[in-house]
Image (cartoon, rainbow, N blue to C red):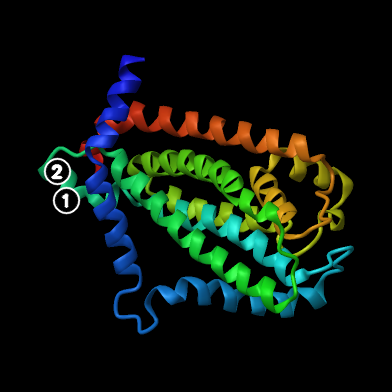
């Protein structure tokens, strides 16, 4: 308990540094961009339009009533995890010069990447609202529950980011392997097709053992009135999301704290 309290105090002590790192990430991302932060809304919007045109004709959409909102809801949740973890994987190696010169808690660099991803996710939520307006989507009080789903995804993504950042210090091939993993992960998460389009065995595996299916489906329940997640009930879906989040956080923290003292020898 004392160690936990010490970690929390250390986190609070370096909150200003973390804020500067988040600000730096956002400024670098949109540096020399004419539209600046507006791209955080336009980029997912353009991708959604292209994917909606292509995949709405390639796949049987089943009982999906508003395919653009269905697609965009999945993108918001999956892209947060995908883009954030890919940005975090180099967070330690990319900060080598600073880590060698002064003492800074190493997790600050990884956590700041995750918070940057949260800001981008909120911008993407703005793009989703635009899509809902133009497709005559139904706005409901349930949209106010968006933070509950995002927090689950945040905890899961934080744990995965810490794990990837730590392991990538010792095994640089992790970043390339992870690119292949996320490609397969994307297609095994019903983003642009209904779960029912998969074989029954695969339906069970995806709905019970793919955490991103839980977060994507929970969010779709908020944006698509009448949406019923296939293969599993809502309460088990939330339970899977919460358990997956904290298990991944434990794995990520344990791996990071266990190996962080050796980072300086490899970066």
Question: In the visual, does 131 lie left or right of 85?
Answer: right
Q: Position of residue 242 (x, y in %)?
A: 62, 34
Taking the spot 33% from the left edge, 50% from the top edge, the residue there is 91
Q: Which mark is residue 100?
A: 2
The x, y position of residue 15, in whole percent, is: 26, 43
Q: Can residue 188 be seen in this view?
A: no
Q: Which of 107 and 92 is in front in this view?
A: 107
Q: Quadrant of the C terminus?
A: top left
Residue at the bottom extreme of this rendering: 34
Left or right: where does residue 232 sit relative to residue 100?
right
Position of 247 relative to 106 (above/below) = above
Residue appearing at x 16%, y 48% in the figure = 98
- Label 1: element kind: helix
**Left or right side of 124 for 109:** left
Quadrant placement of the N terminus: top left
Give the quarter of the image for residue 260: top left
Q: Which residue lies furthest to the left in this view?
A: 101
The residue that disc 1 covers is: 97
CB under 8 Å between discs 1 and 2: yes
The image's mark for residue 124 is none
Location of residue 92 in the rendering, given as x and y in whole percent from the top left corner = 30, 46
Residue 121 vertical position relative to residue 208 in the rendered view, above or below: below
Q: Can residue 74 be seen in this view?
A: yes
Rendered residue at 10%/44% (across/down): 101
């Amino acid at each position: 308990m004392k160690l936990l309290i010490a970690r929390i105090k250390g986190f609070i002590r370096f909150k200003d540094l973390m804020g500067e790192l988040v600000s730096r990430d956002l400024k670098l991302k949109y540096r020399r961009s004419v539209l600046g932060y507006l791209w955080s809304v336009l980029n997912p919007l353009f991708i959604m339009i292209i994917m909606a045109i292509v995949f709405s004709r390639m796949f049987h959409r089943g009982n999906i009533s508003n395919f653009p909102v269905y697609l965009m809801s999945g993108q918001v949740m999956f892209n947060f995890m995908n883009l954030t973890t890919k940005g975090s994987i180099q967070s330690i190696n990319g900060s080598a010069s600073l880590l060698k010169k002064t003492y800074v808690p190493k997790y600050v660099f990884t956590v700041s990447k995750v918070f940057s991803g949260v800001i981008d996710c909120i911008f993407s939520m703005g793009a989703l609202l635009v899509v809902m307006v133009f497709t005559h989507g139904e706005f409901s009080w349930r949209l106010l529950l968006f933070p509950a789903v995002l927090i689950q995804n945040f905890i899961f993504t934080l744990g995965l980011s810490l794990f990837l950042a730590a392991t990538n210090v010792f095994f640089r091939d992790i970043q390339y392997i992870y690119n292949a993993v996320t490609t397969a992960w994307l297609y095994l998460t019903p983003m642009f097709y209904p779960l029912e389009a998969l074989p029954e065995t695969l339906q069970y595996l995806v709905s019970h053992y793919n955490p991103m299916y839980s977060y994507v489906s929970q969010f779709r329940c908020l944006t698509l009135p009448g949406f019923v997640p296939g293969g599993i009930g809502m309460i088990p879906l939330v339970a899977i999301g919460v358990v997956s989040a904290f298990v991944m956080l434990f794995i990520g923290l344990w791996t990071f704290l266990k190996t962080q003292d050796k980072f300086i020898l490899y970066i």
